[in-house]
């Protein structure tokens, strides 16, 4: 899997890039997390191809992943869906709604 386009990626097409709290006008090379986020937002805003807007560092799980593990990944990475891979191929996607339905079933816990 080389990437995935999610609703979070697409929303950048309709919004302005988040301006960092500190922006160095002289262009000195200073690491600041807000600048990196601004650059990423701006690239997605200007995107015209899938490869320019997609998230390339995709979090995935195998079909045997425990629900708790998947939920923890979603929380840790602030994502709503995770592709499920088997032998390198996508066989499904698990979303927050899937987890809620599973945990809400009588006798699931």
Image (cartoon, rainbow, N blue to C red):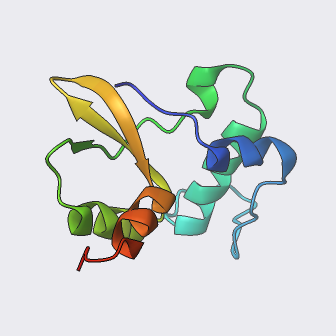
Question: To which quarter of the image does residue 16 belong?
Answer: bottom right
- Which residue: 47% across, 61% down? 96
* Quadrant occupied by the N terminus: top left
Question: Looking at the image, which residue sits at the far front?
Answer: 106
Q: Is residue 2 left or right of residue 27?
A: left
Q: Is residue 38 left or right of residue 68?
A: right
Q: Is residue 57 visible?
A: no
Question: To which quarter of the image does residue 6 belong?
Answer: top right
Q: Is residue 48 left or right of residue 83?
A: right
In the rendered image, residue 66, in percent from the top left (x then y), is placed at 18, 60
Count of numbered labels shown in the rendering: 0
49, above or below 83, in the image: above
Q: Nearer the viewer, residue 73 or 16?
A: 73
In the rendered image, residue 79, in percent from the top left (x then y), is placed at 48, 58
- Which residue: 15% across, 23% down? 87
- Which residue: 75% across, 22% down? 48
Question: To which quarter of the image does residue 50 belong?
Answer: top right
* Quadrant occupied by the C terminus: bottom left
In the rendered image, residue 33, in percent from the top left (x then y), is placed at 52, 66
17, above or below 103, in the image: above
In the rendered image, residue 105, in percent from the top left (x then y), is placed at 37, 71
Q: Nearer the viewer, residue 51 or 36?
A: 51
- Which residue: 24% across, 69% down? 68
Q: Is residue 109 visible?
A: yes
């Amino acid at each position: 899997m080389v990437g995935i386009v999610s609703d979070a990626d697409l929303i950048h097409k309709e919004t302005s890039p988040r301006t960092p709290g500190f922006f160095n006008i002289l262009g000195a090379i200073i690491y600041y997390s807000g600048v990196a986020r601004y650059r990423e937002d701006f690239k997605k805003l200007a995107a015209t191809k899938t490869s320019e807007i997609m998230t390339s560092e995709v979090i995935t799980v195998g079909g045997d992943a425990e629900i708790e593990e998947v939920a923890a990944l979603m929380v840790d990475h602030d994502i709503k869906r995770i592709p499920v891979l088997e032998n390198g191929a996508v066989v499904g996607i698990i979303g927050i709604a899937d987890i809620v339905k599973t945990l809400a079933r009588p006798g699931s816990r």
